[in-house]
Image (spheres, rainbow, N blue to C red):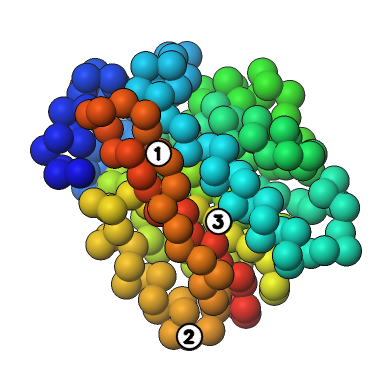
Amino acid sequence: MAAKSYEAGVRKYYGDRLTNISGDTTSEEIRHVYDNWASEYDKNVVDAARCVCHKPLAESLDGALKDNFPEKAKDDLKIIDVGAGTGLIGIELQKLGYSNLQALDISPEMLKEAKKRNIYKRFFCVALSDQQIPEIQTGEFDALICAGSLLAGHIRAAAFEEMVRMVKHGGIICFNVRDGQLDDYREKIQELERTARWEVISKNAVSFFETEEMPRETYAFLFRVLGK
Ligand SMILES: C[S@@+](CC[C@H](N)C(=O)[O-])C[C@H]1O[C@@H](n2cnc3c(N)ncnc32)[C@H](O)[C@@H]1O
């Protein structure tokens, strides 16, 4: 979908909340945007714009975890949801039987909404970047999932370094990026492949939004972490 049309859809459903977000947007600015949006987020994104990517993304991770850790019970698999927002991914992972879930987000108000759902065991209110988060140990998680948060002004490509650090050798990273945004992430994705830090498992188009003005599909990526 052309960028112009995407922007019109975003304005229609989200108002002017995201219209001034760009690569130059600071962490403080993005936190402010989501803090102010938190109480209305699900209404705008799920009910109005009909964003439906959470289920297929959770199912993609579920499939990879079954293949990768066939001997491990779902309750034992420790998963971090980064850019977790109000917890829409947590809902889908819980439906699939996962309970050892933790959430990371820059916005305290978004995490407040997620807490109300009683799904996640631990919360990290921090900006994900290439900087190490001291509270998270290297290789602490079996898997990481990141939905709808790899876009301009949000979680930048350099943060893949920290995502890889958090996940154990052989663990899974699942995220989505829409077509118009892929250029910002491609180089870092390829660098981590070239340097054998992760290997691609799959890249599939999955349903994204069910309204005409918004992109119908997004790319779901699955990677296996190889080394630190
Ligand atoms: C579009 S929302 C997606 C939320 C949720 N994953 C979903 O699918 O509904 C983007 C989220 O990323 C968070 N975010 C943006 N930049 C971030 C950063 N650098 N580190 C952590 N979270 C960030 C925002 O606060 C917001 O909750």
Quadrant of the image containing the C terminus = bottom right
Q: Does dot 1 land on a helix, a strand or a loop?
A: loop
The amino acid sitting under disc 2 is Thr
Q: Nearer the viewer, residue 179 or 130?
A: 179
Residue designated by label 2 = 195
Badge 1 or badge 3: first in the primary sequence? 3
Question: Disc 2 versus disc 3: distance between alpha carbons?
Answer: 19 Å
> Which numbered dot is residue 208?
1
The amino acid sitting under disc 1 is Phe
Q: Position of residue 156 (x, y in %)?
A: 37, 55
Badge 2 or badge 3: first in the primary sequence? 3
Question: Disc 1 versus disc 3: distance between alpha carbons?
Answer: 15 Å
Residue located at (40% from left, 78% from top): 191
Left/right of residue 139 with respect to residue 113 in the rendered view: right
Residue designated by label 3 = 174
Q: Does dot 2 land on a helix, a strand or a loop?
A: loop
The amino acid sitting under disc 3 is Cys
Q: Nearer the viewer, mark 1 or mark 3?
A: 1
Q: Position of residue 61 (x, y in %)?
A: 63, 53
Residue located at (14% from left, 35% from top): 5
Q: Nearer the viewer, residue 188 or 46?
A: 46
Q: Quadrant of ligand 1?
A: top left
Are circles 1 and 3 on residues that touch, CB within 8 Å?
no
